[in-house]
Image (cartoon, rainbow, N blue to C red):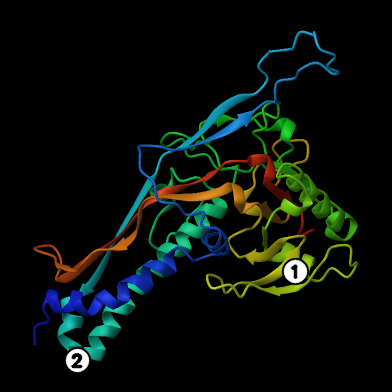
Amino acid sequence: MSISTELLNTTFEDLRGPLVNSFVRSSELFEALDKKARIPMEGGTLIERTFSGGAPARGVGIYVGDELLNMTRRQEIRKFQVEPHRLAVAINIPKKELQMNSGKLAIIRLIEEYPKTVLEGAKADLNSYLLTGTSRGIVFTTAELAGMLSLNGDVSTGIGTGVTNGLLDWQPPANQSDKVQNVTKSNSYFHFNQYADIGTYATDGTKKLRKLYRECAHYAGGLGKGPDLVIFDDDTFANFENDKLNNVRVQLVEDKTEKSTMLGLSLGLAQVFSSLDLDTSIMTNSAATGASSAPREGAGYMLNTDYIEFAMHEAPNISEFKERVGDQDVVTAVFTMQGNMICTKTPAQGCVAGGAE
């Protein structure tokens, strides 16, 4: 019996929403952004956010009444810019499969299984790219994702407006000079990230992590507004988890809010997770001196998601299924999404190398 695309789409209608919603809650980073409503919808040719560069204008030290005020402008309003990046991938169901599975339950299984498999691969590729600048290559190649902002500052794409390098440099602020979000990094106007280099975890891991947390929190307004998300490679996470010194507050926490099902450890206000996508291969310039060297063992990010967004120009969506004519004996739907990550306060973010040593 032939299955009409009309019947297929009617059956798929109830499945589309949950599949699409799962895409924007597909990782610890997306979970954190979604929970804080940091995945906004917007238009325009560019995603733009303003930030203050430089210190505020200074007046006189002690005001008596007739002194001349120093009106030299010391604070500049600058714009971060990135282009929205479009993703699209076909979801093909062979007609032979539909013919062989014509019962209602079998049809439901097919139109759930095929989109779910494609979206799982797409999510894995996107999440890997956002952390490392490299796709896993399941659905999207690295070249197809290039132009999106990743966290890894050692990756350069040079595609589109704004995204030249990833967000976080693996070197001290004074050595950071990459162009990120269409603005060249400089510690003279507060466009840099924090960085820590751990010698060995047993020797100074706890101390370096606490210091990095304080540095990030300082630029967000104090310890009560510090990073809320930490992602380590698995070996660094294991060292953190097994730390017996009690210098770092280690506690198993469960976020039971409606939008989150995450489990992790905590550091300050931050939940701490491991990612198998993170390893030493993402770093090529991670010496404390800023000079190129062999990568340190271990990589991690300390993030304040109050200042990170994934701005959408087109929300994730799956089109209706249509018959392909000529080239393939399949029915096809298309998953699409358009947007990009942007950060409005880079000094509140940090990265750490060496935690696995």
Residue at 85% x, 58% y: name it. 206
As drawn, is 311 to the left or to the right of 280? Answer: left
- Quadrant into which the N terminus falls: bottom left
Residue at 72% x, 52% y: name it. 225
| Observer-nearest of 103 and 276 | 103
Residue at 73% x, 51% y: name it. 353
Q: Earlier in the sequence, mark 2 or mark 1?
A: 2
Q: Position of residue 128 (x, y in %)?
A: 52, 58
Examine the image and state in which quarter residue 170 appears: top right
| Observer-nearest of 179 and 341 | 341
- Tell me if mark 2 has few (under 14), some (14-19) or many (20+) residues whose alpha carbon lies within 10 angstroms of its own: few
Residue that numbered label 1 is attached to:
238
As drawn, is 268 to the left or to the right of 323? Answer: right
Q: Nearer the viewer, mark 2 or mark 1?
A: 2
- Quadrant into which the C terminus falls: bottom right
SS at mark 2 in the image: loop
As drawn, is 72 to the left or to the right of 63? Answer: left
Residue that numbered label 2 is attached to:
103
Q: Is residue 330 visible?
A: yes
Examine the image and state in which quarter residue 265 appears: bottom right
- Tell me if mark 1 has few (under 14), some (14-19) or many (20+) residues whose alpha carbon lies within 10 angstroms of its own: some
| Observer-nearest of 319 and 166 | 319
SS at mark 1 in the image: helix
